[in-house]
Amino acid sequence: MRVTARKPASDGFAVLELLLVLVIVAGVVGVGAYVFKQKQNANSLTSTTSSTPAATKTVAKVPAAGTSAAVDQITSTEAQAEVNASSASDAQIQQDANSANSTISSVGGAYNETNF
């Protein structure tokens, strides 16, 4: 009786490696395309494409998305919106407190005695 050594079955391993490499390459290409498109969109917002002369046109410079300047701009815009909302709320509370129907006004105007 003869004993022969068997080779390990590695026939499908090359195909699996190829598929893994293709998935990784596709992912890198997809991320690169997304970043490229975002950069083009950011650049198109800051470019002037109209027929108005550049000397008479003022364009607000929009920082590129994802930069610290963009984050700073968003943060300051939201902080200003918060201050405006707080000021409006404080003004409404002060107005309600000074009105003759301050209790009714705080309820939300369920009824108004001045209409009687």
Image (cartoon, rainbow, N blue to C red):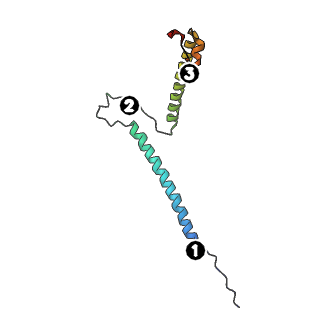
Q: Earlier in the sequence, mark 2 or mark 3?
A: 2
Residue 13 in the figure: left or right of residue 40? right
Can you say whether 83 is above or below 52 in the image? Answer: above
Q: Residues within 10 Å of mark 2 (few under 14, many from 20)?
A: few
Residue at (38% x, 31% y) in the render: 59
Q: What residue does disc 1 label?
A: 11
Marks 2 and 3, how far apart at CA: 30 Å
Q: Nearer the viewer, residue 2 or 94?
A: 94
Helix, strand or loop at label 2? It is: loop
Marks 3 and 1, how far apart at CA: 69 Å
Q: What residue does disc 3 label?
A: 86
Helix, strand or loop at label 1? It is: loop
Q: Earlier in the sequence, mark 1 or mark 2?
A: 1
Q: Position of residue 48 (x, y in %)?
A: 35, 36
Marks 1 and 2, how far apart at CA: 62 Å
Helix, strand or loop at label 3? It is: helix
Q: Quadrant of residue 15?
A: bottom right
